[in-house]
Image: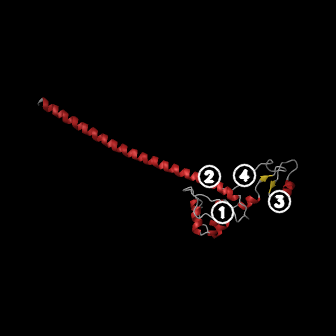
């Protein structure tokens, strides 16, 4: 065998080895590109979840304040507008939100259901129309409002008795008090009020 034949054979083997390495690198490159694409997709999904969570959080903050303000409207004030809540999915004002508490009585079942859905307040059980409307009142802050407003739980700074607008309540509290024992929170303290969440 001649020297040139041996060199040509070695060159062919080197080219085949190089082609195998290139093929292996291309395969690894495709695998890495797939991993990168998967990684980028996961990053995008996490960013989307973060944005959705931010929207829900802002809506929840707004709704908590609106519920509190709605709970402070006296039940006899039929002329006062409710403070609208926002959708937890978009943080935008709810479509067909009742302007006044009395409007809830005349709302369609579809509107009530849509509001409960947008507030993520569905119970997962079947409810009749009256139960759904009661649930909506509860969710927007007017369900138990009458007891909250009639008894605002503000402590009188003079005698430590809760103010409720009536003298009978103060007299009853004084009769129940034990001698030498304080009744209620310290004078001037405001107790928290609002809907149950």
Q: Is residue 55 visible?
A: yes
Residue at point 40% right, 47% down?
A: 37
Q: Would you say 177 lies left or right of 6 here?
A: right
Q: CA distance from mark 1 to mark 4?
A: 20 Å
Q: Which residue is mark 4?
A: 192
Q: Is 87 or 143 nearer to us in this picture?
A: 87
Mark 2 or mark 1, which is nearer to you?
2
Sequence-wise, the earlier of marks 2 and 3 is 2
- Quarter-of-image position of residue 84: bottom right
- What x and y, as percent, mark residue 48? 49, 50
Mark 4 Cα shell of 10 Å, populated few (<14), some (14-19), many (≥20): few
Picture coordinates of residue 43, whole percent (x, y) = 46, 46
Tell me the element at label 4: loop
- Circle 1 SS class: helix
| Neighbour tally class for label 3: few under 14, some 14-19, many 20 plus, Cα within 10 Å | few
Distance from disc 3 to disc 4, alpha carbons, whole Å, reads: 21 Å
- Is mark 2 in CB contact (under 8 Å) with mark 4? no
**Lower position in the chain sequence, tag 1 or tag 4:** 1
**Residue that carries the numbered disc 3 in the rendered image:** 166
Question: In this figure, which residue is indicated by the disc labeled 2?
Answer: 61
Above or below: residue 125 compared with residue 9: below
The reply to whether callout 2 and callout 3 are in contact (CB within 8 Å) is no
């Amino acid at each position: 065998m001649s020297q040139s034949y041996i060199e040509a054979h070695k060159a062919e083997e080197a080219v085949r080895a190089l082609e195998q390495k290139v093929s292996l690198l291309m395969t690894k490159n495709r695998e890495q590109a797939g991993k990168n694409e998967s990684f980028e997709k996961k990053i995008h999904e996490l960013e989307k979840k973060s944005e959705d969570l931010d929207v829900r959080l802002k809506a929840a903050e707004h709704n908590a304040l609106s519920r509190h303000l709605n709970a402070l409207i006296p039940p006899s004030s039929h002329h006062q507008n409710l403070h609208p809540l926002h959708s937890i999915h978009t943080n935008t004002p709810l479509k067909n939100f009742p302007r006044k508490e009395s409007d809830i009585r005349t709302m369609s079942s579809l509107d009530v259901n849509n509001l409960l859905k947008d507030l993520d307040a569905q119970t997962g059980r079947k409810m009749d129309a009256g139960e759904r409307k009661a649930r909506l009142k509860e969710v927007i802050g007017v369900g138990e409002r009458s007891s909250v407003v009639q008894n605002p739980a503000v402590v009188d700074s003079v005698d430590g008795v809760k103010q409720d607008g009536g003298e009978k309540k103060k007299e009853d509290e004084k009769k129940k008090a034990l001698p030498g024992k304080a009744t209620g929170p310290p004078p001037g303290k405001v107790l928290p009020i609002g809907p149950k969440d």
